[in-house]
Image (spheres, rainbow, N blue to C red):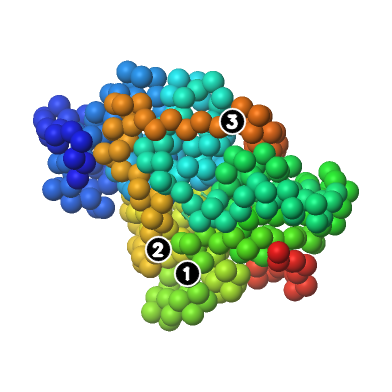
Amino acid sequence: MYDGFEALPFTPEVEASTAQVWEKIRAKVTPLEWRLQAPLISAINGLKRHKNAVILAHNYMTPEIFHGVGDYVGDSLGLAREAAKSDAALIVQAGVHFMAETSKVLCPDKRVLIPDLQAGCSLAASITAADVRLIKQRYPGLPVITYVNTTAEVKAETDVCCTSANAVQVVEWAAAQWGVDRVILLPDEFLARNVARQTSVGVIAWHGRCEVHERFTAADILELKEAYPDAEILAHPECPTEVLEVSDFAGSTAAMSDYVARRQPRQVVLITECSMADNVACDAPGTEFVRPCNLCPHMKRITLENIYEALVKEQFEVTVDASVAERARLAVQRMIDMPPPAAPARYDLVKARRHVDVELI
Ligand code: 13P
Ligand code: SF4
C-alpha cells in the first residue's frame, strides 16, 4: 500500500461517490481492497476537477484505475487521439513512458505527468535514434514507419508512426506515397512479420520484442484449445506469427474489446497482458474469461497510489526537447490524420498470402 500519505478514510461520502465503480468492478476486487481503493478513487477524481486534469488510461491498467479514474481509456492509438483533442491543462498518463512522451509531443503546451518514471517498455528500449539513422543510410529512399512504442527521439527520425490497430493501413499508405514496394517497419519483429502477412508490400524489420507477448507459443494455444474446446482465442499481433496462426482472431487491444462486445462469446481467452481481460470482463458479464496471461511489469508500476501522488505533487513531468518534439510530431500527426479504420483492424492470417517478404536486421 502507498506509504507516502496515511491511508485515506472510507467514509459514507466516499462510498456513495464510488458506488457505480464498485458495481462495475466488484467481481475483480475484494471488499478489503475496495476500502483502500475507494477513498483514493474519490480523491483522484476530486483532484482532477480541481486541477483541470485528465487521466489517459491504457487497456493494461488494473480495473480500479481503468474503470475508477480513467477519463479516456483504450489502446495506444485511441489514447494518442484523445491526447491530441484534450483541452485539459494537465494530462496524467496511466500507461508507460513512451505513451506520455507521445502525449507531450502532441500537446507541447500542456503539462504531462507519469506516476512512475521507470514505467518503460522492452520495445521502446530495443532501438535508438542512432540505430534508425544507420538503417536509413543502409536503405535510402524507403519510408521509415515506427510503432508508437518508441522514444520521441526515435519518432523524430521517422516518417510516420503506426500502432497495431492501423499498421497495415500505414504500411500501404507509405508504400503508395513514396512509390516503393518495400518499407522499413520498426522495432517489433513479430508485429512486422504479422503485418507482412496482410500486404504485398515488403517489410524490413528490426529485432525488437514485447517481453509480454513474445512469451506465448503456439503450443500454449493448442493446449488451451484442447482444455477449453469452446473458447474463442484472441491474440495480440505483438505475439509470434505461429501464435496468431492457431488463434481464432488477432487484433489490437481495442479490436479484442470490440470483438467481445460485438460477438459476446460464451468463453474467451485473451492472449495478451493480464489486466486487459479483467477490464473487458467488467463490461461482459455473459462471457467467461479463461485467464492465461502475462503481466507487463512496466504497466504494473502504475497504481492508484502513485496516480494520487502524481496529482498532489504534480510529478513526474515528462518533457521532450523542442526540436525532437517538432520532428516527432510530424510522424505522429500523420498517423492521427489518417481516417480511423471503420472497424478495429484484424489480422487475418488464415486467409493471408503464403509468400511473405520480410528482411530482419
Ligand atoms: P495496443 O494498445 O496499441 O494494442 O498496444 C498494446 C501494447 O502492448 C501497448 O504497450
Ligand atoms: Fe511494452 Fe509489451 Fe509492456 Fe506494451 S506490454 S508496454 S509493448 S513491454
Q: Residue 215 carries which label?
A: 1
Q: Earlier in the sequence, mark 3 or mark 1?
A: 1
Point out the frontmost of discs 3 and 1: 3
Which residue corresponds to the image point at 79% horizontal and 61% vertical from the top-left?
A: 202
Count of numbered circles in the view: 3
Label 3 element class? loop
Q: Which of marks 2 and 1 is nearer the N terminus?
A: 1
Point out the frontmost of discs 2 and 3: 3
Q: Distance between the residues labelled 2 and 3?
A: 34 Å
- Left or right of 56 on screen, residue 349: right
Position of residue 342 measured from the top left corner of the image (x, y, whole percent): 64, 44
Report which quarter residue 84 is drawn in.
Answer: top right
User: Ligand 2 near label 2 (Cβ, under 8 Å)?
Assistant: no
226 above or below 325?
A: below
Q: Are marks 2 and 1 in contact (CB under 8 Å)?
A: yes
Within 10 angstroms of label 3, few (less than 14), some, or many (20 or more) residues? Answer: few
Q: Residue 294 carries which label?
A: 2
Q: Which mark is residue 321?
A: 3
47 above or below 218?
A: above
Report which quarter residue 18 is drawn in.
Answer: top left
Q: What residue type is labelled 1?
A: Arg
Position of residue 93 measured from the top left corner of the image (x, y, whole percent): 43, 36
Within 10 angstroms of label 1, few (less than 14), some, or many (20 or more) residues? Answer: some
243 above or below 274?
A: below
Q: Quadrant of the N terminus?
A: top left
Q: Distance between the residues labelled 2 and 1?
A: 8 Å
Which residue corresponds to the image point at 56% horizontal and 25% vertical from the top-left?
A: 108
Position of residue 241 measured from the top left corner of the image (x, y, whole percent): 61, 70
Res 169 seen here: no
Q: Earlier in the sequence, mark 2 or mark 3?
A: 2
Q: Which amino acid does label 3 sit on?
A: Asp
